[in-house]
Amino acid sequence: MDKHFKFSNSVIGLPLFFVLFLWFVYWLEIRFGFDFGKNGILPRTFSGLQGIIFSPFIHSDLNHLYNNSIPLLALLAALQFFYAKQSFSVIGFGIIFSGLLTWIIGRENYHIGASGLIYVLVSFIFFKGLLTKYYRLIALSLTVIMLYGGMLWYVFPEVDNSISWEGHLAGLITGFALSFIYKTPEYKKELKYDWEKPDFDPIEDKFLQRFDENGNFVNLPPIVEEEVELPYFNSNDAVVYTIIEKKEDD
């Protein structure tokens, strides 16, 4: 596995917790008869500012919630695995800035749902992968656009008046901006061989020396061993030897 990306419990825990919380909020609404729709984004009104924080956690019906849950599980897991250091910031600021932009450009109606956050994640993962120019992240970008590229149509008005195209457009713009704001480490391919290194000199390489300029295999010239005269050490001190006769055993 690539040393830049490490699996942790948060890769599964983050998306599960987030989606389960959405379902918990919806359960509270139907169980106790609450109407959280009025806590959504109501553009250009002071009371509608609360929806910037609350709207991603509010859904109109079960189908709306289900359609947002599946992409969130996949995208949040991908974000946490490949961009672990930026994940919480992308989620937090993605919710705030996409919600604020929806509050500015949205129609005079309540805008609710986590689809704006989904567009933030799709946009961020796609553009960030292209900006890094790292092959694994580029592959992730292509996978995301292949799976969710059809969502692009829903950032235009009149495609479906029952959805908040303004929230989708705001999420797309926010994710694009965040991909430039948050920096990732410079991913470099690990060099395993000497010939991959920039300071590699083929002339000094023992293996390449066995080939001539035409690529033909040649034998290395014979190694000539030079005789080296070892220095002798002299001493000016006199050496006296004493001879002791060996005694025979009785």
Image (cartoon, rainbow, N blue to C red):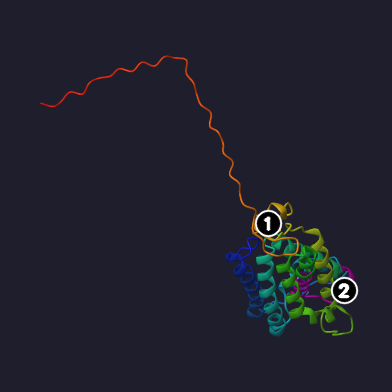
Quadrant holding the N terminus: bottom right
Q: Is residue 194 left or right of residue 39?
A: left
* Crowding at mark 1 (Cα within 10 Å: few <14, some 14-19, many 20+): some
At 74% from the left edge and 58% from the top edge, which residue is drawn?
184
Three-letter residue code for mark 2:
Gly
SS at circle 2: loop
**Placement of 33 over or under 218, stated as above or below:** below
Q: Residue 92: x, y in percent? A: 73, 63
Three-letter residue code for mark 1:
Gln
Residue 121 lies within the magenta run? yes
The extreme left residue here reads 250
Quadrant holding the C terminus: top left
Question: Label for residue 209?
Answer: 1
**23 and 120: which is toward the camera:** 120
At 84% from the left edge and 81% from the top edge, which residue is drawn?
153
Q: In this view, does 53 lie to the left or right of 107?
A: left
SS at circle 1: helix
Q: Tag 2 or tag 1, which sits nearer the N-term?
A: 2
Camera sees residue 47: no
Q: Residue 60: x, y in percent? A: 74, 81
Mark-to-mark CA distance, 1 and 2: 70 Å
Q: Residue 202: x, y in percent? A: 72, 55
Residue 113 lies within the magenta run? yes
According to the picture, the residue beneath numbered tag 2 turns out to be 106
**Placement of 166 over or under 192, stated as above or below:** below
Magenta segment boundaries in residue numbering: 104-123
**Placement of 212 over or under 108, stated as above or below:** above
**112 and 205: which is toward the camera:** 205
